[in-house]
Image (cartoon, helix red, strand yellow):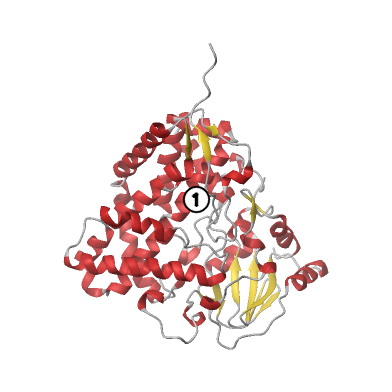
């Protein structure tokens, strides 16, 4: 059922409107700062979206925010409305190349990959990746993931009794998994690790994130070139051996970049923030330690819904003028789906603002939806199950090592939300004799 726009909603939309000159040739790589009034879908207070996001959804699940670089910005926050947009492959395009201006760019500066590609390119690339993420193929990774988790837990114990969980657990596990999955040589992993840190940071507008993405793609294209001559044991080498003649280095480098994009930072965020939430919910933490598979899965799914580190989906661009739940959308407008907003819509979630296992059966959008749903979703679930159950069993008395929220380093204006530090105490303090 469509919720009508109210007069208050129209005023809210007007409040968000941006005044400025429109550029006839939009170029997101020149955008140094996102206008303040457009940033609230990327802001949080701890793990929770700022109240303005819920207010916007309550007033209108589809809202015109204003414009940037001459492009209308439409925000979608409702669950049903988000599902509709994410599933509609006819009304919207994900191709962002028209936003790169007119300057001639290198191959690594191009935008592509599954999330920012339309059919037939998207169909071709997804068809290449999908066999690598079948349940049968993923089943062979269980032993590798368990080994990586055990190594990380051993490292935490060796550096205890207090450690930074983000550094030694949150980032360490998915980074090593993605390196082994891609077949990244040991001697280049430190360099690869540094490239991922600034990828989703929008504090400098599109310029900073675009530059970081270009560096990562440059690195991965070079890795593909090297593996052409000597294919490794991972995904890059396997694709080169089986279908390498059908794809050039830039295409395969972009594909590897998409795997890195979807499988590293997002899983790192889920592990770090998941541990933070679980320390405040001891019953759920105990389920991870002693519960059966179905009970563990409920904890994982509710963490995904509640935390949803990917705050907004890849932008959609309207192919033609159309009406979107009562809001006129012009051809070329940018439609942003707030995944965090949709996941906390009280129209479908019983207790939307709470971490509550009674919410676990609600459909969530942590992995997106439709044609562009994350191809590595099941791998991410495998990592979360293995890592979080391993953490609960090894350190059942895990607790925060600080009462100061400022020490946690919550990120600001990042498409993939997380925290940069999480000091934890691995065991209870010994009782004095």
Front residue of 431 and 111: 431
Q: So how many labels did they put on this image? A: 1
Q: Which residue is depicted at the point 63% across and 37% down?
A: 403
Q: Which residue is depicted at the point 70% across and 61% down?
A: 57
x and y, in percent, of residue 332 in the image: 58, 82
Q: Quadrant of residue 334?
A: bottom right
**229 to the left or right of 346:** left
Q: Residue furthest top?
A: 433
Can see residue 78? yes
**58 to the left or right of 259:** right
x and y, in percent, of residue 282 in the image: 57, 31
Check disc 1 and report the residue beneath it. Answer: 269
Q: Which residue is depicted at the point 52% across and 67% down?
A: 314
**9 to the left or right of 131:** right
In terms of secondary structure, where does tag 1 sit? helix
> In the rendered view, would you say 274 is above or below 398?
below
Can see residue 127? no
Q: Residue furthest right?
A: 7
> In the rendered view, would you say 72 is above or below 282?
below
Front residue of 88 and 404: 404
> In the rendered view, would you say 34 is above or below 377?
below
x and y, in percent, of residue 147 in the image: 31, 40
């Amino acid at each position: 059922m469509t919720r009508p726009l109210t007069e208050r909603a129209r005023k809210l939309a007007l409040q968000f409107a941006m005044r400025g000159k429109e550029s006839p040739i939009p170029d997101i790589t020149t955008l140094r700062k996102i206008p303040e009034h457009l940033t609230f879908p990327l802001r949080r207070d701890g793990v929770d979206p700022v109240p303005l996001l819920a207010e916007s959804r309550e007033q209108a699940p589809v809202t015109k925010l204003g414009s940037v670089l001459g492009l209308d910005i439409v925000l979608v926050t409702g669950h049903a409305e988000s599902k509709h947009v994410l599933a509609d492959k006819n009304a919207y395009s994900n191709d962002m190349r028209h936003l790169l201006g007119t300057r001639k760019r290198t191959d690594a500066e191009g935008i592509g990959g599954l999330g920012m590609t339309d059919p037939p390119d998207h169909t071709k690339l997804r068809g290449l990746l999908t066999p690598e993420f079948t349940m049968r193929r993923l089943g062979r990774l269980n032993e590798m993931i368990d080994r990586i988790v055990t190594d990380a837990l051993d490292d935490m114990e060796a550096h205890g009794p207090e450690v930074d969980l983000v550094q030694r657990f949150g980032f360490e596990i998915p980074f090593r998994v993605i390196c082994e999955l891609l077949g990244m040589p040991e001697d280049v992993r430190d360099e690869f690790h540094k490239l991922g840190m600034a990828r989703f940071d929008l504090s400098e507008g599109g310029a900073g994130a675009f530059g970081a993405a270009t560096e990562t793609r440059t690195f991965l294209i070079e890795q593909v070139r090297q593996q052409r001559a000597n294919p490794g044991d991972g995904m890059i080498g396997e694709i080169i051996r089986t279908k390498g003649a059908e794809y050039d280095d830039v295409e395969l480098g972009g594909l590897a970049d998409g795997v890195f994009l979807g499988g590293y930072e997002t899983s790192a965020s889920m592990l770090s923030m998941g541990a933070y939430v679980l320390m405040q919910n001891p019953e759920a933490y105990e389920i991870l330690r002693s519960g059966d598979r179905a009970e563990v899965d409920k904890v994982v799914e509710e963490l995904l819904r509640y935390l949803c580190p990917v705050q907004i989906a890849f932008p959609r661009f309207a192919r033609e003028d159309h009406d979107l739940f009562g809001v006129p959308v012009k051809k070329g407008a940018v439609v942003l789906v707030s995944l965090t907003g949709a996941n906390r819509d009280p129209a479908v979630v019983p207790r939307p603002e709470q971490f509550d296992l009674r919410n676990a059966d609600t459909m969530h959008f942590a992995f997106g939806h439709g044609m562009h749903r994350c191809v590595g979703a099941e791998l991410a679930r495998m990592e979360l199950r293995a890592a979080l159950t391993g953490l609960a069993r090894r350190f059942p008395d895990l607790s925060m090592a600080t009462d100061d929220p400022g020490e946690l380093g919550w990120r600001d204006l990042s498409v993939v939300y997380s925290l940069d530090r999480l000091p934890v105490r691995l065991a209870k303090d010994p009782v004095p004799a």
